[in-house]
Image (cartoon, helix red, strand yellow):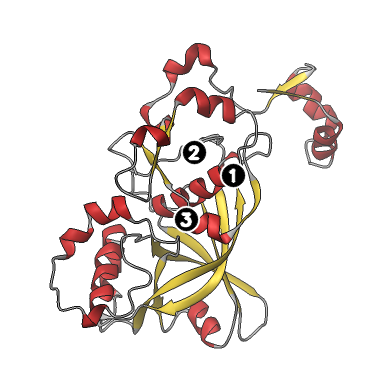
């Protein structure tokens, strides 16, 4: 994609240390500057790798899968113009599911200034968000039953689980009444997680600015019930094996599992010429289907 030397671009560069003269020398006096890599066109769609193709997983079982396919050529067409809020909601839910690190922002209890720190999280959609009485359930079924079937049947409401440490600055702030928000961007996972897919409709994989990110406002609630705690523990350790030292009951730190109940969603899908930017209504976010990569090696 070629971007002309617009007034805005020149003004931006003119305010930098490069200066306009150096900028002219750097681009060789050409009338255009290659800012972004070219997008694939229908003539060479075959160059797309597997993880550039998507299907939408329905949150309800038994529906026609073909209804949810997004073909590669439709990705190309939609990538040249902003997609709608329904697609944005699916991308936001997919981002939450694929990644596992977030920034938790609170107000520092001592200084009254914003404080933001990285936290581990896990999206565990097959753990029921409304089953408050699971300890009263005498059915002793295996946790393994939750893994495959439930993931295809119920994608939850997009409220992630975190491990709250008593000594953590963020959770001390929350205990003193601070409001909280979390933000997640493409690439928010440990460097050892090689299976995380960075591709989304309308995104530019090698550009962090051209990739999705989301800010979620909400409140924390404690995870209650023996069975739910066990399911959350299994899910959380599946994404963060090193967290075994800090889970509830560990002698190292006092801790508990909490769920961040989302109340408001603000989404930036990438660049505005091809991606949605703005609020996503909560009901649309909570009920959105999740994009699943067609490559089984990736999330």
Q: How much space separates mark 2 and mark 3, taking CA atoms?
A: 19 Å
Q: How much space separates mark 2 and mark 1, taking CA atoms?
A: 9 Å
As drawn, 276 above or below 176: above
In this image, 265 relative to 194: left or right? right
Q: Which residue is mark 3?
A: 287
Position of the N terminus, as image quadrant, is top right
Q: Earlier in the sequence, mark 2 or mark 3?
A: 2
Q: Residue 159 in the image: state x and y as whole percent.
A: 45, 65
Q: Residues within 10 Å of mark 3 (few under 14, many from 20)?
A: some
Q: Residue at x 31, y 58 (%)?
A: 239
Label pair 2/1, CB-CB below 8 angstroms: yes
Q: Nearer the viewer, residue 282 or 60?
A: 60
| Secondary structure type for disc 2 | loop
Q: Residue 182 in the image: state x and y as whole percent.
A: 54, 65
Q: Residues within 10 Å of mark 2 (few under 14, many from 20)?
A: many
Label pair 2/3, CB-CB below 8 angstroms: no
Q: In the figure, residue 253 lies in which quadrant?
A: bottom left
Q: In the figure, residue 124 lies in which quadrant?
A: bottom left
For residue 200, the mark is: 2
Q: Residue 235 in the image: state x and y as whole percent.
A: 28, 63
Q: Residue at x 55, y 36 (%)?
A: 203
For residue 269, the mark is: 1
| Secondary structure type for disc 3 | helix
Observer-side mark, 2 or 3, equals: 3
In this image, 15 relative to 214: left or right? right
């Amino acid at each position: 994609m070629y971007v002309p030397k617009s007034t805005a671009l020149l003004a931006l560069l003119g305010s930098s240390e490069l200066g306009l003269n150096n900028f002219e020398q750097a681009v060789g006096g050409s009338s255009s500057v290659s800012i972004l890599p070219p997008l694939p066109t229908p003539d060479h769609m075959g160059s797309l790798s597997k993880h550039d193709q998507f299907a939408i997983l329905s949150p309800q079982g038994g529906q026609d899968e073909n209804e949810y396919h997004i073909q590669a050529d439709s990705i190309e067409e939609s990538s040249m113009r902003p997609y709608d809020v329904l697609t944005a909601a699916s991308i936001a839910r997919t981002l939450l599911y694929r990644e596992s690190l977030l920034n938790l922002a609170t107000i520092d209890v001592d200084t009254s200034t914003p404080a933001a720190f990285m936290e581990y999280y896990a999206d565990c959609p097959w753990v029921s968000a409304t089953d408050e009485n699971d300890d009263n359930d005498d059915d002793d079924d295996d946790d393994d039953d939750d893994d495959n079937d439930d993931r295809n049947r119920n994608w939850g409401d997009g409220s992630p689980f975190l491990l709250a440490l008593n000594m953590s600055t963020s959770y001390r702030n929350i205990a003193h009444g601070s409001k909280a928000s979390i933000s997640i961007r493409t690439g928010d996972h440990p460097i050892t997680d090689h299976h995380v897919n960075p591709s989304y409709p309308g995104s530019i994989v090698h550009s962090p600015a051209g990739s999705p990110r989301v800010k979620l406002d909400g409140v924390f609630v404690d995870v209650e019930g023996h069975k739910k705690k066990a399911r959350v523990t299994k899910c959380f350790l599946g994404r963060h094996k090193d967290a075994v030292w800090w889970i509830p009951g560990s002698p190292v730190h006092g801790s508990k599992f909490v769920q961040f109940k989302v109340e408001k969603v603000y989404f930036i899908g990438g660049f505005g010429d091809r991606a949605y930017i703005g609020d996503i209504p909560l009901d649309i976010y909570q009920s959105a289907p999740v994009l699943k990569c067609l490559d089984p090696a990736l999330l």
